[in-house]
Image (cartoon, rainbow, N blue to C red):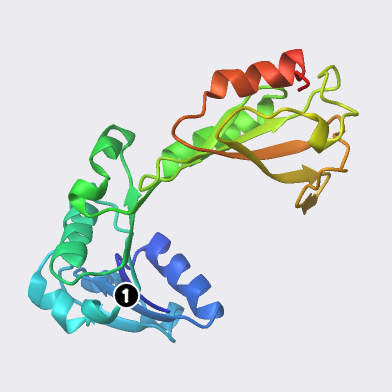
């Protein structure tokens, strides 16, 4: 996979290094000479250029990219980069970093963004997840499909404890995708029994009602 990353700061370099470890081809683009720390990610291709200029993106051969990532600390740059990549170069997948949560509403397909990653929102979710047992926490939203990932840690008093997965009538448009028990994640089967302290990971569609899922955890299931 070929990935072009706008922004060679600590975030961009970290993404690049991880992708290179997984044998992907990476190009880092930044207009700031001080960001050209080539020695830190020597296997990437580096380009000193403005990622908001079409000429620069042509030089980075964005048209051949499978994915582009707007990873700068400037939301305007990430939006313009995503829009150019999508509309001018027909890049199949665009990922953009959201620095200011107040700008998150703009990071959608109207600006060419397929996936928006809001670091403050993710950190907030992680804080909530760390201190909340029994409370449903939204971890991530897929902007293209509108699907959400939710997490809940099953409290000891939950009526779900001891029930098999197949005995629970999960809400409509809701899928139990993963159980984390201790430090071990696994794909649940119908015969798996739920235990206190289990972290349940759900994927929900646009029609799902998180309040119904929360009530299920607290009040227990209905049986067909």
Residue at x 22% of width, y 78% of height: 63
Q: From what the image shows, is residue 103 above or below residue 215?
A: below
The residue furthest front is 224
Q: Which residue is at a point 45% across and 78% down the rendered structure image? A: 40
Q: Quadrant of the N terminus?
A: bottom left
Q: In this orientation, which residue lies closer to the viewer: 140 or 124?
A: 140
Residue drawn at 15 percent across, 69 percent down: 50
Q: Secondary structure at mark 1?
A: strand
Which residue sits furthest top? 219
Count of number-bearing discs: 1
Location of residue 108 in the rendering, given as x and y in whole percent from the top left corner? 27, 45
Q: What is the quadrant of the C terminus in the image?
A: top right
Image quarter for residue 86?
bottom left
Where is residue 222 drawn, in percent x and y?
A: 75, 18
Which residue is nearer to you in this view: 56 or 159? 159
Q: Is residue 220 left or right of residue 63?
A: right
Is residue 79 left or right of 200 when viewed as pictured? left
Q: Position of residue 9 (x, y in %)?
A: 35, 63
Mark 1: few/some/many CA within 10 Å (<14, 14-19, 20+): many
The image shows residue 154, relative to residue 108, as above or below, that is above
Compared with 167, 22 (above or below) is below
Rendered image quadrant of residue 215: top right
Q: Which residue is mark 1?
A: 28
Residue closest to the eye, 202 or 103: 202
């Amino acid at each position: 996979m070929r990935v072009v990353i706008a922004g060679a700061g600590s975030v961009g370099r970290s993404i690049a290094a991880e992708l290179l470890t997984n044998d992907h081809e990476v190009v880092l683009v930044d207009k700031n000479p001080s960001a050209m720390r080539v020695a830190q990610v020597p296997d990437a291709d580096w380009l000193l250029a403005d990622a908001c200029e079409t000429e620069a993106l042509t030089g980075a051969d964005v048209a051949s990219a499978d994915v582009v990532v707007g990873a700068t600390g400037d939301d305007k740059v990430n939006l313009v980069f995503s829009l150019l990549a999508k509309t001018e170069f027909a890049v199949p997948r665009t990922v953009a970093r959201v620095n200011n949560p107040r700008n998150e509403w703009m990071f959608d397909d109207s600006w060419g963004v397929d996936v928006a990653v809001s670091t403050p929102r993710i950190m907030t979710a992680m804080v909530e997840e760390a201190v909340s047992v029994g409370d449903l926490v939204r971890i991530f939203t897929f902007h293209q499909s509108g699907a959400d990932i939710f997490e809940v840690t099953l409290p000891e008093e939950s009526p779900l404890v001891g029930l098999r997965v197949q005995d629970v009538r999960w809400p409509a448009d809701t899928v139990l995708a993963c159980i984390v028990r201790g430090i071990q994640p696994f794909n649940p089967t119908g015969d798996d029994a739920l235990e206190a302290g289990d972290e349940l990971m759900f994927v929900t569609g646009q029609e799902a009602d998180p309040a119904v899922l929360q009530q299920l955890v607290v009040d227990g299931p209905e049986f067909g």
